[in-house]
């Protein structure tokens, strides 16, 4: 089983333009989410595609570019401006040897940091576990 790398505070943001009209606004929101989560943005990798790549979401060339960018900035976290499939997230984490967080995971991390009541903390933890359960390697 592949162990998820622990994250640091330096993050590379990844955003792909699929021709959406609100692309720039979405990227700005990702920057704000990363800051709210306490991450320091070290770089941003952008690209254009017609559709997501089944293996790496961003394609193998961009994935290699992301690996080099993360090494150059000594970043151990990549935050995607999109929802990744469980296999895409696993494939990226194996390739990058770093923590990969999609948009939903980043939002859940923020909720976890902000939850104050015992019930709130439990609800956020349950949501995080449900999200992570889809990303577990099969036996």
Image: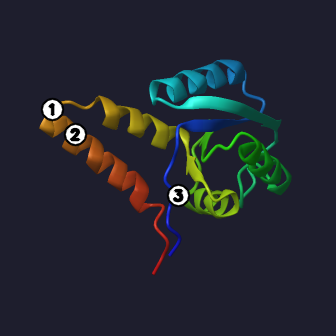
Q: CA distance from mark 2 to mark 3?
A: 23 Å
Q: Which mark is residue 39?
A: none
Question: Residue lying farthest left?
Answer: 118
Badge 3 density bin: few <14, some 14–19, many ≥20, Cα 10 Å: some
| Left or right: where 51 falls relative to 81 | right
The answer to whether one can see residue 48 in this image is yes
Residue 138 position within the rendered picture, expressed as x and y whole percent measured from the top left? 48, 76
The residue indicated by pointer 3 is: 5
For label 3, the SS is loop
- Please tell me which residue lies in front, 51 or 87: 87
Badge 1 density bin: few <14, some 14–19, many ≥20, Cα 10 Å: few
Q: Is residue 51 above or below residue 112?
A: below
Residue 59 position within the rendered picture, expressed as x and y whole percent measured from the top left? 80, 53
For label 1, the SS is loop
Residue 46 position within the rendered picture, expressed as x and y whole percent measured from the top left? 78, 34
Q: CA distance from mark 1 to mark 3?
A: 29 Å
Question: Residue lying farthest bottom?
Answer: 139
Q: CA distance from mark 2 to mark 1?
A: 6 Å
- The residue depicted at 47 percent of the width and 43 percent of the height is 105
Q: Which mark is residue 117?
A: 1
Q: Are marks 2 and 3 in contact (CB under 8 Å)?
A: no
Q: Quadrant of the C terminus?
A: bottom left
Query: Of tags 1 and 3, which is closer to the observer?
Result: 3
| Left or right: where 72 falls relative to 3 | right
The residue indicated by pointer 2 is: 121
């Amino acid at each position: 089983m592949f162990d998820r790398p622990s994250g640091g505070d330096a993050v590379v943001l990844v955003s792909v333009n699929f021709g959406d009209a609100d692309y720039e606004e979405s990227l700005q929101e990702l920057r704000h989410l990363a800051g709210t989560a306490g991450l320091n943005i070290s770089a941003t990798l952008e690209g254009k595609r017609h559709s997501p790549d089944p293996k790496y979401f961003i394609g193998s060339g961009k994935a290699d570019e992301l690996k080099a960018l993360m090494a150059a900035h000594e970043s151990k976290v990549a935050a995607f401006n999109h929802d990744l499939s469980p296999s895409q997230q696993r494939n990226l984490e194996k390739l990058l040897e770093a923590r990969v967080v999609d948009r939903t995971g980043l939002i859940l991390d923020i909720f976890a940091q902000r939850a104050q009541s015992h019930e709130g903390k439990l609800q956020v933890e349950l949501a995080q576990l449900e999200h992570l359960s889809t990303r577990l390697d099969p036996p």
